[in-house]
Image (tube, grey):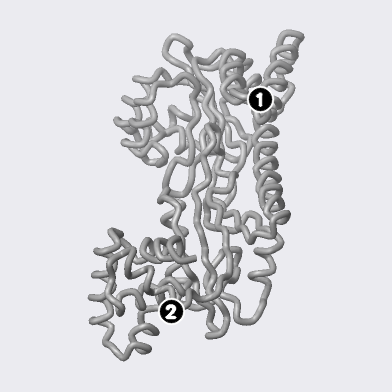
């Protein structure tokens, strides 16, 4: 246990006087307005820095293997680029991360000194001196299995070390920052539920997916689609949207993961385990990111709809549009109807290798690079 150089815990009334009470009241108002006002978080952090007599205030989110967000008002973009380059979210690099304590417990320079002496980091030392943050204090606001949200006051050489009063003001303000972060989280969750509810009015099956790939909210039609109906193409497994068939799940899961990494919208036909049940078209859209994104907001929208097969009579216009052979048009329609390669090859009495060659020819003529793009193209043309 490191020595406690503070003597206060977040929220302690230690050092209260009229000026302290007035300034902490200003911090309270700023943080509680932050989730609702445009530029509210920037304004709150600037005021918090001023009232703790610090150069900057920082709100940071750390995941298991990366920085989730790093908010520092009025900092140059080079700061963030450099932070990521030196992997400063890692405790072996960043002595601030290495001194992380229990939620709402404040640590400061004495704790930093102990870690720097025991395990110095030249990269982070150079980084933090270049950006005027050698002193200050910090606390953890929220922490769960895979995310930590922390608040810090950063001070330059000119500011010097924090005083007991500075740390008491920081501790008091941290309680208001925590309330604001919780409000932001509640608003994100409420917003997800309202967005899913909006799809109810038009009877659309919509799933909202969070950054972990879990379903954050779903419409009534989506709930009915995965609600245990026998023969359905989609299901929920431990909170994740998946395909009922193993091969379809192996298609959908990587698609969702790629979308979470920022891949453009895609369409996938997910077949049912029962031959007579129609496949489901899943359209995956990346949702826009907000300037202040704490990781609570949904990241993906998946719209699912069932559709009957494209009839074989539509092969002629497809041949004309893409200059396909009769066999190629039949194969393209089968793919668009949700059939997997093994089924198509067996139905046509051909080998998987021959079918693969034919699909490559279809993709080349269609000017697409992936099978999923071909399926989306055929569905746009024929449905």
* Percent position of residue 260, x then y: 46, 52
Residue in front for this viewpoint, 308 or 180: 308
Q: Quadrant of residue 240?
A: bottom right
Label 2 vs 1, first from the N-terminus: 1
Residue 377 picture location, percent across and down: 40, 61
Residue drawn at (59%, 30%), measured in percent from left and top? 106
Residue 132 vertical position relative to residue 334 in the rendered view, above or below: above
Camera-side residue of 326 and 181: 326
Check disc 2: other Cα within 10 Å, few if <14, some if 14-19, many if 20+.
few
Q: Which residue is mark 2?
A: 312
| Disc 2 secondary structure class | helix
User: Which mark identifies residue 37?
Assistant: 1
* Quadrant of image for the N terminus: top right
Residue nearest the viewer, comparing 251 with 279: 279
The residue at 35%/77% (across/down) is: 331
- Residue 102 is labelled as none
Give left or right: position of 257 versus 15. Answer: left
Going 42% across and 50% down the picture, which residue do you hit?
264
Q: Is residue 288 left or right of residue 164?
A: left
| Residue 296, above or below 13 | below
Point 33% across, 88% down: residue: 348
Cα separation, mark 2 vs mark 1, equals 56 Å
Q: Secondary structure at mark 1?
A: loop
Can I make out residue 134 in this image? no
Question: Residue 144 at x, y = what percent?
Answer: 59, 49
Q: Residue at the far bottom: name it.
A: 349
Q: Quadrant of residue 141?
A: top right
């Amino acid at each position: 246990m490191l020595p406690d150089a503070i003597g206060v815990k977040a929220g302690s009334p230690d050092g209260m006087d009229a000026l302290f009470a007035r300034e902490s009241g200003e911090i309270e108002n700023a943080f509680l307005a932050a989730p609702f006002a445009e530029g509210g978080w920037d304004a709150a952090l600037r005021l918090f820095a001023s009232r703790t007599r610090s150069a900057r205030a920082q709100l940071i989110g750390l995941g298991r293997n990366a920085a989730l967000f790093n908010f520092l008002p009025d900092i140059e973009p080079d700061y963030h680029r450099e932070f990521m380059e030196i992997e400063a979210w890692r405790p072996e690099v960043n002595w601030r991360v290495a001194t992380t304590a229990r939620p709402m417990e404040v640590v400061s320079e004495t704790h930093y000194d102990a870690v720097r002496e025991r395990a110095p980091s030249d990269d982070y030392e150079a980084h933090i001196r270049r950006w005027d943050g050698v002193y200050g204090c910090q606390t953890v606001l929220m922490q769960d299995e895979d995310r930590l949200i922390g608040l810090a006051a950063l001070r330059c050489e000119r500011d010097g070390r924090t005083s007991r009063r500075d740390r008491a003001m920081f501790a008091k303000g941290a309680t208001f920052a925590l309330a604001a972060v919780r409000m932001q989280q509640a608003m994100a969750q409420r917003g997800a539920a309202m967005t899913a509810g909006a799809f109810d009015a038009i009877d659309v099956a919509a799933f909202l997916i969070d950054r972990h790939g879990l379903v954050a909210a779903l419409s009534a039609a989506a709930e009915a689609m995965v609600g245990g109906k026998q023969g359905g193409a989609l299901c929920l497994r431990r909170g994740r949207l998946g395909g009922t068939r193993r091969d379809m799940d192996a298609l959908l899961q990587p698609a969702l993961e790629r979308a979470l990494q920022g891949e453009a919208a895609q369409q996938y036909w997910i077949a049912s385990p029962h031959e007579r049940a129609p496949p489901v078209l899943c359209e995956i859209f990346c949702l826009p990111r907000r300037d202040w994104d704490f990781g609570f907001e949904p990241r993906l929208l998946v719209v699912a709809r069932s559709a009957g097969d494209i009839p074989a009579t539509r092969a002629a216009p497809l041949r004309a549009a893409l200059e396909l052979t009769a066999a190629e048009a039949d194969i393209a329609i089968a793919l668009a109807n949700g059939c997997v390669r093994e089924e198509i090859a067996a139905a046509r009495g051909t080998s998987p290798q021959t079918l693969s060659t034919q699909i490559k020819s279809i993709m080349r003529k269609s000017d697409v690079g992936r099978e999923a793009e071909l399926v989306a193209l055929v569905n746009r043309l024929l449905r």
